[in-house]
Image (cartoon, rainbow, N blue to C red):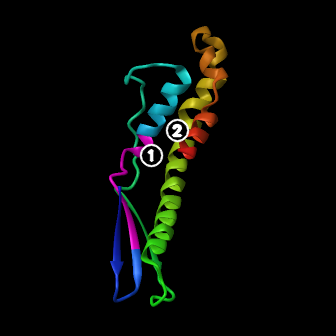
């Protein structure tokens, strides 16, 4: 959820995206489940501080022309900025997980017949789907 704060004194709008600490782990779990086709919540995601995100993300924009500025437009710009920061952080965690858990598994999947389907499904495609939502 994004909360907006308007500071009339400094003519600033701040967007704050809250409750994001576990978003990377949730997204990775969903992506892995889609790749391996499991329909339950027991997909193992390691507990790592690398997957924890900030509790909140903030973005502040300074209004250049406060007399003619539309607050809705300012909120749109602030939202765009905070989401850019959020997705950059989310991508870093997903990339870390991919490089430490998925990539080595895929490279060794040929030795395990039951996991060959996992190798054929694209984790990158799941990442792309997540960004398109």
- Horizontal side, residue 118 vs residue 48: left or right: right
- Is 22 magenta? The answer is yes
Q: Earlier in the sequence, mark 2 or mark 1?
A: 1
Q: Secondary structure at mark 1?
A: loop
The residue closer to the viewer here, 87 or 5, is 5
97 horizontally vs 44: left or right? right
- Label placed on residue 97: 2
Q: Quadrant of the N terminus?
A: bottom left
The residue at which mark 1 appears reads as 50
In the image as oriented, which residue stretches furthest toward the top? 113
- Residue 71 image-quadrant placement: bottom left
Q: Which residue sits at x=34%, y=89%?
A: 9
Q: What range of the chain is rendered magenta?
A: 14-25
- What is the x, y in percent for residue 98? 57, 36
Residue 49 vertical position relative to residue 15 in the rendered view, above or below:
above
Q: Residue at x 64, y 22 (%)?
A: 119
Q: Kindly check if marks 2 and 1 are in contact, taking CB atoms under 8 A apart as contact.
A: yes
Above/below status of 88 relative to 106: below
């Amino acid at each position: 959820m994004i909360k907006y704060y308007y500071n009339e004194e400094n003519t600033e709008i701040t967007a704050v995206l809250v409750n994001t600490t576990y978003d990377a782990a949730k997204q990775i779990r969903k992506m892995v489940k889609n790749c391996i086709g499991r329909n339950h919540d027991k997909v193992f995601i390691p507990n790592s501080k690398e997957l924890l995100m900030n509790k909140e993300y903030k973005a502040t924009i300074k209004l250049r022309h406060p007399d003619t500025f539309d607050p809705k437009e300012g909120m749109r710009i602030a939202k765009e900025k905070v989401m850019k920061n959020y997705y950059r952080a989310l991508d870093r965690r997903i990339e870390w997980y991919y490089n430490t858990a998925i990539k080595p598994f895929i490279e060794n999947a040929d030795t395990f017949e039951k996991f060959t389907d996992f190798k054929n499904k694209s984790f990158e495609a799941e990442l792309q789907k997540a960004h398109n939502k």
